[in-house]
Amino acid sequence: MTLKLTVIGTGYLGATHAACMAELGYEVLGVDVDKEKIDSLSRGELPIHEPGLPELLRKHTQSGRLRFTTSFEEAGRFGDVHFIAVGTPQRAGEHAADMTYVDASVTAIARAATKSSLIVGKSTVPVGSARRLKTLARDESQGGVAIDFAWNPEFLREGFAVEDTLRPDRLVVGSDSVGAVDVLREVYADALSRDTPFIATDFETAELVKVAANAFLATKISFINAFSEVTETVGGDIRTLADAIGLDSRIGRKFLNAGIGFGGGCLPKDIRALQARVSELGLDTTMRFLNEVDEVNLRRRDRAVFVAETLVGNLEGKRIAVLGVAFKPNSDDVRDSPALDVAARLFNSGADVSVYDPAANANAARRYPRLNYVDSLSEAVRDADLVMMLTEWSELVSVDPDELAKTVAHRRIFDGRNVLDHGRWTAAGWDIVSLGHKSELLDEVLKH
Ligand code: UDX
């Protein structure tokens, strides 16, 4: 008999996982405490921008293979496997992860399960959580109902979430139960038929794989951004430096793009939560380098604001066009977005900030309603004293400098993502300053 799956938590991770599991042929029930979210998902409507996901959601809500509910009772009767995909945000005023939603979900589904089933954690959690949650689930379950437990971290990238879920580059399962691992081999049979590496391990390793991967990626970005500080001072080309070290296959070119740094719902909070957790374990200095990684990352935003101030003089009343506010291109997510942070800081210093993002304007407006959000690039740059390229959407990067020159007040552009061709922009009469590049113009202004 085909396994019936529930996915608890229908945010980014959960909605994607639920739709992809339905695509693989399973009957899936998505569960969330947010009734509005459940109602809109049931209608096949997705509140996030993710290529390919709306189509899958519509296809499977229509076929009936994918349903949504707020009822844990229904989920407990229905599911053979319950995936936990709720968020673990940074706790307010602290670095540690907030486990409230994970704990509540595991408790609720363990209480509601009326048949023997497997609970599988997918959320990113502090190491040691899975073992604790396994005990919690057993304690909360009904008599005679056997609950198995596993941890199966998720590595999906926003913008590629469907692809990453249907065709993952590896599957990691932590458990102390052979039965649990076998069930997950069955769930992921499609990926396994293509020889996807399947790593069966203990709970702690599985939990750590996720945070280690994100900590490594964050470190790689801050590594190149630290070198940006050097090339900004001494000269040199940060892109060529990245290309040259990236050709060493031990290093690799990916995640060496210098710019205003990393943001999003994972990297920043995960490196902070890892430090907090490891300190709790008495290893106060072990992950201290991640504090530097965080600080290098945040300094890039300071640098962007500094360059803007230096280029336009006093920011008060200056018109600044911000191109891109999503935390990365092809996403409408503005969680911890470096671009939005820079835009808000310019506004708070008195600048008149016009923002254009191909997908994230609405989300950004909910966070910082006082910026001037416009519907097109040309509207954003009209009469601008400075244009700031902060998120490298291809629509924005491919803009023609000659065209843009016609509408701005001053031909000044800041390239916060190292994506613009200096020669081309300079030939069109622009002053261009990029992070990671020494700027004679800046030096000149600073001299006076
Ligand atoms: C990340 C991980 O990549 C993914 O495996 C995990 O499951 C969740 O967290 P995501 O948050 O979607 O995924 O974004 P990612 O593509 O990793 O980018 C993170 C941030 O780093 C973005 O703000 C991006 O602009 C920035 N970045 C990325 C750089 O500044 N330079 C780079 O070279 C790469």
Image: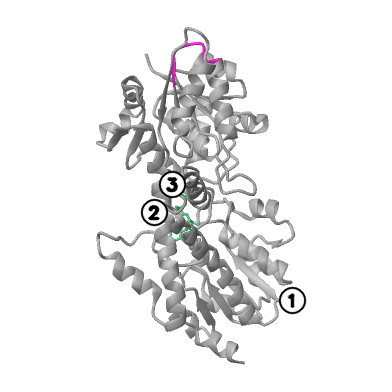
Where residue 63 appears, x then y in whole percent?
49, 24
| Horizontal arrangement in the rendering, residue 125 relative to residue 321 (left or right) | left
Q: In which quarter of the image is the N terminus?
A: top left
Marks 2/3 in contact by CB < 8 Å: the verdict is: no
Q: Distance between the residues labelled 2 and 3?
A: 20 Å
Give the residue pinned by disc 1: 316
Q: Disc 2 vs disc 3: which is toward the camera?
A: 2
Residue 385: assigned label = none
Note whether ligand 1 is within 8 Å of mark 3: yes
Q: Is residue 115 magenta?
A: yes
- The answer to whether residue 44 is visible is no
The local crowd at label 3, few if under 14, some if 14 to 19, many if 20 or more residues have their Cα within 10 Å, is some
For numbered disc 3, what is the local secondary structure?
loop
**Magenta-drawn segment:** 112-118
Q: In which quarter of the image is the C terminus?
A: bottom right
The local crowd at label 1, few if under 14, some if 14 to 19, many if 20 or more residues have their Cα within 10 Å, is some
Q: How far apart are marks 1 and 3 (CA)?
A: 40 Å
Marks 2/1 in contact by CB < 8 Å: the verdict is: no
- The answer to whether residue 27 is visible is yes
Inspect the image, locate mark 3, and give the three-letter code of the amino acid beneath it. Answer: Phe
As drawn, 373 above or below 419: above
Q: Which of 335 and 383 is in front in this view?
A: 335
**Sequence-wise first label, 2 or 1:** 2
Where residue 109 appears, x then y in whole percent?
54, 21
Where residue 278 appears, x then y in whole percent?
46, 46
Give the residue pinned by disc 2: 216
Give the residue pinned by disc 3: 160
